[in-house]
Image: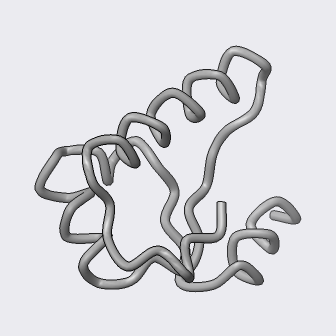
């Protein structure tokens, strides 16, 4: 998920990410977060959610991770 245009994550945004992560997982996939800014990363870390997601600096890096 490209978060480049997301300035911050509130509780509704965090809930959406967790629900989407769970839905992807039940279908055999996963959710990766790309282009998160420093504030969003801090929020994910503070809430303990950073460890649930693969975080990438860019969409290119996230997509490239599937080729590994």
Q: Residue at x 74, y 66 (%)?
A: 65
Quadrant position of residue 32: bottom right
Residue 2, position as x, y percentages in the image = 65, 70
> For the view shown, which residue lies furthest in the top direction?
26
Left or right of residue 49: residue 24: right
> For the view shown, which residue lies furthest in the left direction?
46
Instruction: Specify the quadrant that holds the N terminus.
Output: bottom right
Instruction: Specify the quadrant that holds the C terminus.
Output: bottom right
Residue 17, position as x, y percentages in the image = 48, 42
Front-lying residue, 68 or 17:
17
Left or right of residue 57: residue 37: left
* Way the structure is coloured: one colour
Quadrant position of residue 43: bottom left
Q: Residue at x 75, y 33 (%)?
A: 29
**Numbered circles on residues, count:** 0
Q: Residue at x 33, y 48 (%)?
A: 51
Left or right of residue 57: residue 67: right
Residue 26, position as x, y percentages in the image = 69, 15
Residue 57, position as x, y percentages in the image = 53, 84
Q: Is residue 61 above or below residue 45?
A: below
């Amino acid at each position: 998920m490209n978060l480049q245009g997301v300035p911050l994550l509130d509780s509704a945004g965090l809930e959406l990410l967790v629900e989407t992560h769970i839905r992807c997982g039940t279908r055999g996939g996963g959710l990766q977060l790309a282009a998160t800014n420093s504030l969003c990363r801090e929020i994910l870390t503070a809430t303990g959610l950073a460890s649930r997601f693969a975080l990438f600096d860019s969409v290119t890096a996230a997509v490239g991770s599937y080729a590994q």
